[in-house]
Amino acid sequence: MGQVLMSIVTMPSTANPLATPANEVFERDGCLTLSSLTTLADIELIRSLLDPLFDKFDTLGERAVDLAGPREAGVPLRSPEINEVVRLEPRLRSTLAYRRCRDIAAMLLGTPVGYQFDHAIFKPPLNQTATAWHQDESYSREPIPLRSVHFWIPLQPVTVENGCMWFVPGSNHNGLLPHYVASRRFSGPLAENTSVTLATKIVDESKAIACPLPLGGATAHHPLTLHYTGPNQTDAWRKAWILHFGAYGWFRKHLHPKVLAAKLGVGAHPPKLAT
Ligand SMILES: O=C(O)CCC(=O)C(=O)O
């Protein structure tokens, strides 16, 4: 896998991609661009498994939310997201993209990894909704820092215009920044408020780098790396599947000594939230 990875890794920064091993780049920049993670046929397969779920979005309950906030019945979705998609469509686990992400995460972290989370975000044409700057770690309620790699797999070519990923390389070294509640998430029209979308204002956007990608490409980032996607300003959908693989998978999450201690009420680690 090391060989394969070197041939598909490019860096969002300007450094020579072949000069530094991918795991060192990941450690340094907290982000990588994978120019050809998977095949076009595999992307087709992923689309064919995700599209039917978005077609019945309003029947999926709490897993389906609009990141853009509350929605009146009949009003189109602006930033629909489905969480833990592999639980709704287990055939996603057999895709080449899933298997390669797991292998690459193990290589980058230098340890066995397991599935931790996945979600899909579809941005309709002209959706007017950016995904604001944030660190994924801000969503974690775990008592131990996440040790994972988060893959963002677009299901069509992505550009700045349709909402590609942006990163601040190196921001993975500055710890968890204060986040505020950017919007409340609702599942279904006028349904219950299920959770919140977090964002941070502490971003030096002059250091941000856009990552346009061809079909079959992907990005990978560290849980502390600041990232953002812009609104979809085109007349076609922007679809993405996001996969998190982490050290020890379920065991680290549930049986790590600090997790067990937190369950007993010792040393909990709530996310930092600004008001
Ligand atoms: O797909 C998007 O627009 C944003 C994805 C993202 O920010 C994330 O998965 O943390």
Image (cartoon, helix red, strand yellow):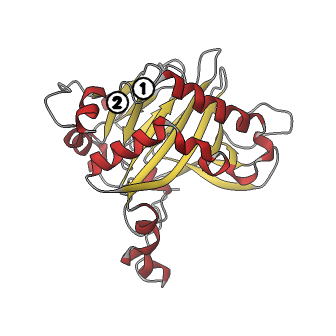
Q: Nearer the viewer, mark 1 or mark 2?
A: 1
Is residue 182 or residue 141 the one in the foreground?
Answer: 141
* Residue farthest toward the right in the current orientation of the protein: 74
Q: Is residue 91 visible?
A: yes
Where is 248 relative to 257, above or below? Answer: above
Quadrant for residue 260, please give it: bottom left
**Amino acid beneath label 1:** Gly
The numbered mark at residue 235 is none
Left or right: residue 137 compared with residue 31: right
Residue drawn where x is 49% and y is 44% of the image: 243
Residue drawn where x is 63% and y is 32% of the image: 122
Q: Secondary structure at mark 2?
A: strand
- Residue 130 location (% of width, % of height): 56, 32
| Location of mark 1 (residue) | 217
Q: Is residue 208 visible?
A: no
Is residue 7 or residue 166 the one in the foreground?
Answer: 7
- Residue 254 location (% of width, % of height): 47, 71
Quadrant for residue 43, please give it: top right
Q: Is mark 2 within 8 Å of ligand 1?
A: no
- Residue 193 location (% of width, % of height): 73, 54
**Mark toward the start of the polypeptide (1 vs 2):** 2
Image quarter (top left, top right, bottom left or bottom right) of the N terminus: top left
| Location of mark 2 (residue) | 33
Whether residues under marks 1 and 2 lie with C-beta atoms below 8 angstroms apart, the answer is: yes
